[in-house]
Image (cartoon, rainbow, N blue to C red):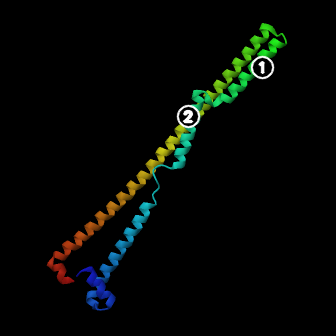
Amino acid sequence: MALSVVLTKLLTGAATAASSAPGATIALGAGQALAGAIKQRKADAMIPALEDPEQRAMRNLIGRKRRAYDTGTANNAERTGLRQLYKSGISNAFKYGAGARGLNEMNKMYMQGLFGLNESGKQTSNQLLQQESQAVDNIAQRKLDILMTKYDTEQARAAQLKTDGNKNLMVGVASLNPKTNKAQ
């Protein structure tokens, strides 16, 4: 009996007690299957994107800062200030007659300042490299977690379909057996 006929009979009350039990079972099964499909679609839509845009933006920001330290552009303001101090120190040394010793001291201080800036930049660059590496690891782990969740979900759905299919096969095979049909 077609589902539409069964549903029509159930809704109009034309079904007899004997014919309504299988029809009600079919209608209930169809309703459950439809509700399950709707919930499955909603659940699939809830799975987040593989990459979080905020994680990606943070990784890019850290990378830009690290490259600025690697190229030396991150300390430009400090370098410019140090150069200005050096120039004014040299002009004051000449102005007040400090001589060669004063110039040597200014050179020494300037070089120590540059060395300190470079060393600080290297340390900061290394720290940023570690942060960038951790950010990349976090992004990769998120992707793996989401993909594994999808995989597990699909495996569970496939197992359920196989189980349901085996049950239906058994019911179908049993209905072909004349001894089983007489007992019903």
- The local crowd at label 1, few if under 14, some if 14 to 19, many if 20 or more residues have their Cα within 10 Å, is few
Identify which residue is drawn at 79% across, 15% down: 91
According to the image, label 1 marks what residue?
88
Percent across and percent down for residue 101 are: 78, 9
**Quarter holding residue 154:** bottom left
Closer to the N terminus: mark 2 or mark 1? 1
> Quick one: 33 or 78, which is closer to the camera?
78
- Reply above or below: 174 against 80: below
Q: Residue at horizontal 19%, vertical 72%? A: 173
Find disc 2 in the rendering and name its residue. Answer: 129
Q: Give the foreground label among 2 and 1.
A: 1
Label 1: element kind:
helix
**Left or right: 169 as drawn, with respect to 78:** left
Residue at image location 80% in from the left, 13% down from the top:
93
Q: Measured along the vertical axis of the image, is residue 170 above or below residue 69?
A: below
Proximity of marks 2 and 1: CB atoms separated by less than 8 Å: no
The kind of secondary structure element at disc 2 is helix
Q: Residue at x 28, y 63 (%)?
A: 162
Disc 2 marks a residue whose amino acid type is Leu
Residue 68, x across and y down, in percent:
59, 32
Is residue 27 shown left or right of residue 64? left
Residue 95 is situated, as x and y percent measured from the top left of the image, at 83, 13
The answer, for residue 22, to whether it is visible in the render is no
Decide if residue 179 is on the left or right side of residue 107: left
Q: Identify the residue at the far top of this view.
A: 100
